[in-house]
Image: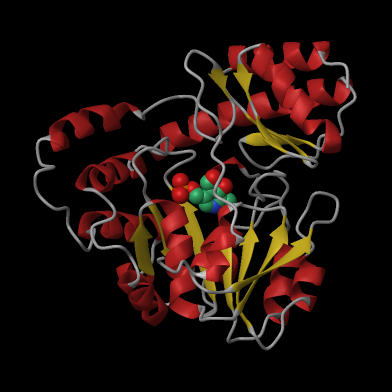
């Protein structure tokens, strides 16, 4: 019998949002607006090249990202989605038995990737659906090597502010890596939610994680990146699966970066919908926290499963977290209307 690592037997599998043909899918925090205008043509052009390996170093993409952020290209490491980059960061600093601290509930890949890296997950309960940075700082021990700060937090949509994040970073020992995961940055109000790169980018123990999967509409192509101190970034690059970011993905990401105005316009539409959906759900009696993301959180606790089934009956797929709540990704206005109509007919 082949011996599987004991740590894997306890490990839950990643649960993706369901894909139901013909249904309205509000389950995976994707952009509802499809490809950015320039991206489709680029993909068609680049498709003929896929008999060749991509550029291992993702040179054009890294240069475009460096120019976008006004930083040295040596500070950037890419991966197949920010999920892979999370794994790369863990493999860079976490060894067997080392602890990895994060809020819970948060992005569900954190405990999985932590266990895969051989680390021990330390889950710190949220307070008011929000990361409890005081409790997270208090959870750090001499075994802690990495802390994930998901800001805004998936799936609860809330965010921590500048003062809290700064105080937290001051409390974390210098040899513990703080990973600020900003997958939903483009949907956050810059007056309320700090840009961790601007705020903490000069600290050697802070890494900022971003993705092309959400506001840039490239979830299916798998591109994410982190910005770190150059020496650390060079190690993170070593842990990438070679060639994991395809040539199509690299090319599309460069083009998408050039369409910043359209990205912002689409994000603004999502934010308008977010405010409308939040108000309506609150009017229906739901205790919806203020969202800084492209999704809203309904803390339905034990009724979460029933609500998801009710929505499925109306061909709307949402993402339940059983016993906790429902995450609803904001879609097109008519898709959100379908969700609201179902919410109005639900008897909890
Ligand atoms: C907080 C957070 N980080 C990272 C990711 C990973 O996204 P991707 O691997 O598509 O870049 C997600 C995806 O849902 C997320 O919610």
| Residue found at the very far front of the displayed protein | 1
Q: Quadrant of residue 131?
A: bottom right
Q: Quadrant of residue 294?
A: top right
Q: How is the image coloured?
A: secondary structure
Q: Quadrant of residue 344?
A: top right
**Can residue 46 be seen in this snapshot?**
yes
Q: Is residue 240 above or below residue 142?
A: above
Q: At x 54% / y 39%, what residue is drawn? A: 16
State the quadrant of the N terminus: bottom left
Q: What percent of the width, then of the height, locates residue 266?
A: 50, 29
Give the left or right position of residue 36, taking residue 340 as reference.
Answer: left
Give the left or right position of residue 268, taking residue 239 as reference.
Answer: right
Q: What percent of the width, then of the height, locates residue 249?
A: 28, 44
**Count of labels shown?**
0
Q: What percent of the width, then of the height, locates residue 346?
A: 82, 15
Q: At x 59% / y 58%, what residue is drawn? A: 11
Give the left or right position of residue 296, taking residue 23 as reference.
Answer: right
Q: At x 66% / y 44%, what residue is drawn? A: 189
Q: What percent of the width, then of the height, locates residue 10?
A: 61, 61
**Can residue 198 be seen in this snapshot?**
no
Front-most of 88 and 301?
A: 301
Q: Is residue 344 above or below residue 298?
A: above
Front-most of 255 and 2?
A: 2
Q: At x 79% / y 62%, what residue is drawn? A: 132
Q: Is residue 146 above or below residue 316?
A: below
Front-most of 43 and 265?
A: 43
State the quadrant of the C terminus: top right
Give the left or right position of residue 273, taking residue 18 as reference.
Answer: right
């Amino acid at each position: 019998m082949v011996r599987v690592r004991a740590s894997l037997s306890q490990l839950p599998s990643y649960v993706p949002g369901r894909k139901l043909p013909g249904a309205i899918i509000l389950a995976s925090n994707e952009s509802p607006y499809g490809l950015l205008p320039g991206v489709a043509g680029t993909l068609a052009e680049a498709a003929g090249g896929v008999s060749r390996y991509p550029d291992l170093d993702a040179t054009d993409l890294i240069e475009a990202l460096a120019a976008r952020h006004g930083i040295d290209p040596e500070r950037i490491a890419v991966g197949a989605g920010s999920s892979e980059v999370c794994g790369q960061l863990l493999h860079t600093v976490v060894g067997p038995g080392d602890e990895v601290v994060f809020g819970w509930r948060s992005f569900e890949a954190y405990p999985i990737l932590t266990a895969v890296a051989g680390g021990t997950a330390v889950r710190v309960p949220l307070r008011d659906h929000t990361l409890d940075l005081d409790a997270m700082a208090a959870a750090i021990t001499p075994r802690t090597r990495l802390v994930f700060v998901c800001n805004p937090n998936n799936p609860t949509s809330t965010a921590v502010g500048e003062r809290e994040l700064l105080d937290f970073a001051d409390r974390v020992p210098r040899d513990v890596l703080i990973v600020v995961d900003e997958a939903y940055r483009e949907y956050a109000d810059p007056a309320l939610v700090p840009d961790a790169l601007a705020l903490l980018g000069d600290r050697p123990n802070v890494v900022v994680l971003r993705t092309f999967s959400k506001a840039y509409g490239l979830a299916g192509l798998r591109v994410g990146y982190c910005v770190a101190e150059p020496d650390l970034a060079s190690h993170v690059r070593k842990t990438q699966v070679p060639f994991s970011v395809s040539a199509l993905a690299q090319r599309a990401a460069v083009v998408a970066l050039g369409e910043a105005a359209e990205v912002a316009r689409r994000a603004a539409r999502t934010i308008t919908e977010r405010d409308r959906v939040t108000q309506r759900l609150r009017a229906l009696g739901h205790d919806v926290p203020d969202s800084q993301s492209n999704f809203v959180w309904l803390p339905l606790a034990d009724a979460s499963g029933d609500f998801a089934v009710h929505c499925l009956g109306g061909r709307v797929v949402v993402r339940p977290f059983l016993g906790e709540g429902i995450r609803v990704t904001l879609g097109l206005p008519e898709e959100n209307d379908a969700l609201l109509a179902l919410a109005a007919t639900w008897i909890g």
